[in-house]
Amino acid sequence: MKPNARADGLVVQDLADETLVYDLERHKAHCLNRAAAAVWRLCDGKRDEAALARLLARDLGTAAEEDVVRLALRDLSRARLLQEPLAAEVRVSRRRLLRRLGQAVALPVVVSIVSPTAVQAATCRMTQPIQVSACNASNPNALGCCCTNRRICASLGVPPGGCNGAAC
Amino acid sequence: MGRPAERGARVAVVLAGSWRAAPPLLDVSARDLIDVAPLLLQTGAASLGWWKVRRSPVASCTAAKELHDAYRLFALQAVLHEQRVAKAFAALRAAGVEAILGKGWAIARQYPDPGLRPYGDVDLYVRPAQHAAAVAALEDPPREGIDLHRGLAQLDDRPADEVFARSRVESLHGVEVRVFGAEDHIRLLALHMLRHGVLRPLWLCDVALALESRPPDFDWRVFASGSRRRLAWVRSAFALAHALLGARLDGVPMPEGAARPPRWLVPAVLRQWSAFVPPHGSRAPMAASLRHPAAFVRGLLLRWPNPVEATVGVGGPFNRMPRLPFQIGDCLLRTAQFARRLAVER
């Protein structure tokens, strides 16, 4: 297996100790810890699990074995962050790995970010009202704007079909 | 301080110094954080809340986790917004229009982390003579989310040529983006915030940040130019940022007594921060409720101006006088404007 990281249709933001990825096609945000982000960036379609584990160990400065890479690939695949999803579900137990490797090894973690009911800092205006139909998850430009149904598209996780923000 | 302002006071405690790279340590209980977290989320100050909370004992509570997620989302949104700003400037420049960016990215870039300052609108200021060309230039891509100002809005008491001459160019995704000079921007931020009644605590953080991160060559003489009344308002905003959020006023020339806000100002703002109030323009239009008495009364109550926006609305001073006359005056002024607009539309 030589996985390749997906590059198209993603917005990536590197923060101090994690990497954030927003999927422009599925409108989902994911948070990758250092280990998961390192594996993801190393996936170039040419390296197998053994090579990835070696490079991961070098990048993180800790021991990393193939099971750690498999765990990362499973999570990345589930989050649709690989060009091709893994052919078969990888059977790796996070708990067992943690027990075997101890706390010293940071296991890769990919979590989806839950959208809080946060509104933007913009001074909303109705001078150019956005159509309700435009204010949904398939139009990220409308996010944070006021809708004509008097609700605010509050966050990146707006479900298809409408706003989920506070009433204007 | 009365009960209604207590939540606002907690918001102020959480946000004090939050714009700094190393904010002061926060000492709040999980219960207090749960109480104010919805307000921080609703007003766009959640990331700053997280920035303060992350090193405190309550960093692992559920409310803190919500603030953390908001911070992550804002960090992602920042990338999308930056692309939008760069595209808009590229389109304007191709059409020969020179615009200045205010607020939004112009202040967000000064925060120590990309996810700390969310923004939605891209506020662009163009000379009135170039407005039509700017509108045409922004048609493709559509100007969704772009707030194009004809002229310099709250900075119209200063010669436009001088404001443009003081503006600076920053690089964003390979595009040159023009932003206001520090002396003009801090004034714009403060006046915009006051005009909207200090509705959002985030705006006061912006003022505090702009004050503390002003460049060494900041020219106070230039800052003070223009309308004396507006200058006094801006100084009141500085005093407010100092009193509520601990903004440092070292080296800021403040006339005798100006460093202390009038007694009504702090409680008025804390009352405002104690409950989420939708901003102007995002409310249902009054015209739509004219035939529904209950909705009309609700609309009127929602629009009753807070003391700050009333003072600015009628062009009054931030002095010790009671605010009720200003609030009544502002209400009458707006009613007259509404009636005039209604008459024109019919």
Image (cartoon, coloured by chain):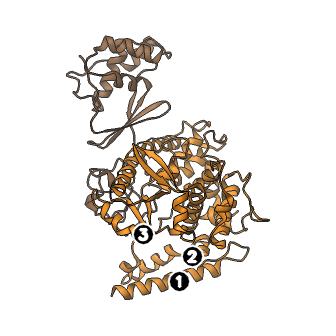
| In this rendering, position of residue B176 left or right of residue B4 | left
Q: Position of residue A50 (x, y in %)?
A: 32, 11
Q: Label 1 near label 2: C-beta < 8 Å?
A: yes
* Front residue (pair B271, B126): B126
* Sooner in the amino-acid sequence: mark 1 or mark 3: 3
Residue A168 seen by the camera: no
List the residue tagged with mark 1.
B333
Q: How many angstroms separate mark 1 from mark 3 (CA)?
A: 19 Å
* Sooner in the amino-acid sequence: mark 2 or mark 1: 2
Colour-to-chain, brown: A
* Sooner in the amino-acid sequence: mark 3 or mark 2: 3
Which quadrant is the N terminus of chain A positioned in?
top left
* Front residue (pair A168, B18): B18
Q: Position of residue B255 (x, y in %)?
A: 76, 64
Q: Would you call the spot at circle 3 few (<14 residues within 10 Å), some (14-19), or many (20 or more)?
A: many
Q: Is residue A94 above or below residue B36?
A: above
Viewer-nearest of labels 3 and 2? 2
Q: Report in which chain the residue with disc 2 lies.
A: B
Q: How many angstroms separate mark 2 from mark 1 (CA)?
A: 8 Å
Residue at 68%, 59% in the rendered image:
B220
List the residue tagged with mark 3.
B283
| In this rendering, position of residue A167 left or right of residue B112 | left
Q: How many angstroms separate mark 3 from mark 2 (CA)?
A: 19 Å
Q: Which amino acid, mark 2?
A: Gly
Do marks 3 and 2 both belong to one polypeptide chain? yes
